[in-house]
Image (cartoon, helix red, strand yellow):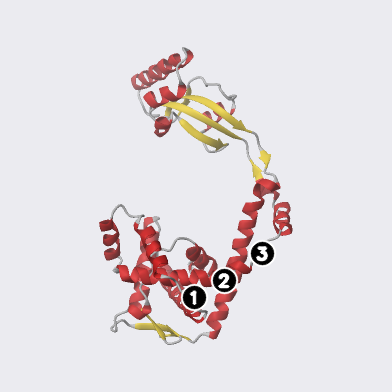
């Protein structure tokens, strides 16, 4: 597992160009007793600041089911320190460039963040867990917006992707634009486990056959799915949306791709139980036309250039800054 990319330009730009998240408190707001571990042009970065960022990252990874080894934590700590340094360099440059963020803009952004929480109290509880005050969050929003504007002015606005660029990418990557055959289907499921006894299987089979009888007598598939289906799609009338080969268990897939739109299958047995499947639409395999993907290609190429050029821009600023790290 590598963490070096946590601090690089692409990750930073992605963060700053999205809605801002909570960042560690400002160096200027740290308590005097905090141990200084680095500085950027005389502005201190403290151990408390790094610890807070580490806690947030480790918690985020843990929620994704990723537990770090001691070696990985050591590498992550180095990456997080470098990330803090880079943000400080960028913020100082934003000040030199005369970038100003209005208080109302900060308040609006804070209001957007608060809306992500069920209540004001939940927001306050989240701040307490992260040992942050609302004032610190507003300071970080202001810094983040200033950095984002700096990157936008110095990098993003200067990047132009031409039609020739997007066309060349399309022609060079034909496999990326092949769309496999897809089918849109709904199903009604009566559950029965593979280890069910004969009586249980017979009961489930009788139930699905009764539903099948209702369909043959003019019953509405979606209505019957809502009433009888024991799968999670039942609430949607059995709708599974579009899927490709390989996304469903084999017996289900074979039946679905063998039907024409409007047709309903006979009873299909899978490890989940008994199904009735109705196909509503089919899309044959095709290669997406250039006109269909041109804009997305342009966005992809622009993001790649932003990451590359922002990285070079940040490295240049760091080269000119006085950066010190405490051994």
What residue appears at the point 62 percent right and 36 percent down from the top-left corner? 181
What residue appears at the point 36 percent right and 26 percent down from the top-left corner? 196
Q: Residues within 10 Å of mark 3 (few under 14, many from 20)?
A: few
Tell me where residue 2 appears, x and y as whole percent. Answer: 49, 66
Q: Is residue 67 visible?
A: no
Give the answer, above or below, for where 164 lies relative to 177: below
Q: Are marks 1 and 2 in contact (CB under 8 Å)?
A: yes
Q: Mark 3 or mark 2, which has the lower sequence index?
A: 2
Q: Kindly state the secondary structure of the residue where label 1 is placed.
A: loop
Q: Which residue is mark 3?
A: 160
Q: Could you say which quadrant of the image residue 232 lies in?
A: top left
Tell me where residue 194 appears, x and y as whole percent. Answer: 40, 29
Give the answer, above or below, for where 118 lies relative to 133: above
What residue appears at the point 45 percent right and 61 percent down from the top-left corner? 19
Mark number displayed over residue 99? 1
The answer to whether residue 144 is left or right of residue 165 is: left
The answer to whether residue 5 is left or right of residue 227 is: right
**Mark-to-mark CA distance, 1 and 2:** 10 Å
Give the answer, above or below, for where 263 lies relative to 47: above
Front residue of this view, candidates 170 and 176: 170
């Amino acid at each position: 597992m590598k963490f070096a990319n946590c601090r690089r330009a692409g990750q930073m730009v992605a963060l700053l160009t999205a809605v801002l998240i909570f960042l560690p408190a400002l160096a200027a707001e740290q308590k005097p007793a905090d141990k200084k571990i680095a500085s950027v042009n005389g502005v201190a970065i403290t151990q408390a600041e790094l610890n807070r960022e580490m806690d947030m990252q480790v918690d985020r990874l843990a929620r994704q089911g990723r537990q770090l080894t001691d070696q990985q934590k050591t590498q992550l700590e180095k990456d997080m320190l470098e990330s803090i340094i880079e943000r400080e360099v960028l913020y100082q440059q934003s000040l030199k460039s005369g970038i100003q963020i209005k208080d109302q803009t900060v308040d609006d952004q804070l209001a957007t963040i608060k809306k992500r929480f069920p209540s004001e109290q939940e927001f306050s509880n989240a701040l307490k867990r992260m040992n942050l005050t609302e004032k610190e969050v507003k300071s970080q929003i202001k810094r983040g917006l200033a950095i984002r504007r700096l990157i936008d002015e110095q990098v993003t606005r200067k990047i132009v992707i031409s039609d020739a660029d997007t066309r060349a990418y399309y022609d060079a990557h034909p496999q990326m634009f092949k769309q496999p055959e897809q089918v849109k289907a709904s199903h009604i499921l009566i559950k029965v486990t593979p280890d069910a006894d004969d009586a249980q299987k017979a009961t489930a089979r009788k139930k699905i056959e009764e539903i099948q009888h209702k369909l043959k007598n003019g019953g509405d598939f979606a209505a019957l799915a809502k009433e009888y289906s024991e799968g999670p799609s039942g609430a949607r009338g059995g709708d599974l949306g579009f899927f490709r080969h390989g996304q469903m268990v084999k017996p289900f897939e074979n039946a679905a791709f063998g039907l024409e739109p409007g047709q309903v299958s006979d009873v299909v047995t899978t490890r989940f139980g008994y199904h009735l499947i109705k196909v509503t639409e089919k899309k044959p395999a095709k290669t997406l036309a250039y006109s269909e993907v041109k804009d997305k290609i342009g966005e992809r190429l622009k993001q790649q250039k932003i990451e590359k050029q922002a990285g070079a821009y940040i490295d240049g600023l760091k080269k000119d800054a006085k950066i010190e790290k405490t051994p």
